[in-house]
Image (cartoon, rainbow, N blue to C red):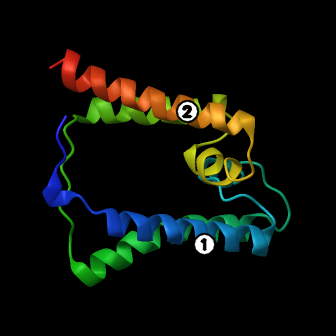
Amino acid sequence: MTIDWIHFTPGMSLLGGVLIGISSALFILANGRIAGISGILGGLLRRRPGDMPWRVAFLLGLVAAPAAIFALTGPLTATIEANTEVLVIAGLLVGIGTRYGAGCTSGHGVWCLSRLSPRSLVATLAFMGAGMAIVFVMRHLLT
């Protein structure tokens, strides 16, 4: 295993983590809810009075932030080493996993681990372990 030192950005990664932590803390202080993306998105399907505006605003913010970066800096270069079928299957598996796991990495990994939830520790370890196993299989066994 080698480290891509050209693209190694611990400072930016730390800043991103700090911003996620601050925004998550502000979110729970303002709304009394955990900022788990799958729960926020799933809540759009269960209509409750007064629940829709903040969910829509949150999700629009997820789209607006990258759009703002694009407008300020121009397009970013990304390389995806998978075809459309693989991406669709991967997306479906992630969606199914978040339903079976009762949440996604943002809810379990960011919020519930900070509350010392044993269930979320198991879920986060499962998410990360499965991700590492799939990358290993795809890069080292199937190529």
Determine which of the numbered discs, if any, sits on residue 54 in the image.
none
Q: Secondary structure at mark 1?
A: helix
Residue at image position (16%, 50%) is 4
Q: How many other residues sit within 10 Å of disc 1, few (<14), some (14-19) or many (≥20)? A: few
Residue at image position (56%, 45%) is 105
Residue identifier under label 2: 125
The quadrant of the image that shows the N terminus is top left
Left or right, 44 with reference to 110: right
On screen, residue 25 above or below 3: below
Left or right, 107 with reference to 3: right
Q: Position of residue 29 (x, y in %)?
A: 77, 73
Residue found farthest to the bottom:
72
Q: Quadrant of residue 12?
A: bottom left
Q: Position of residue 122 (x, y in %)?
A: 64, 31
On screen, residue 126 above or below 29: above
Given residues 141 and 82, the one toward you in this image is 141
Q: Amino acid at mark 2?
A: Leu
Q: Position of residue 131 (x, y in %)?
A: 41, 31
Residue identifier under label 1: 22
Q: Quadrant of residue 54?
A: bottom right
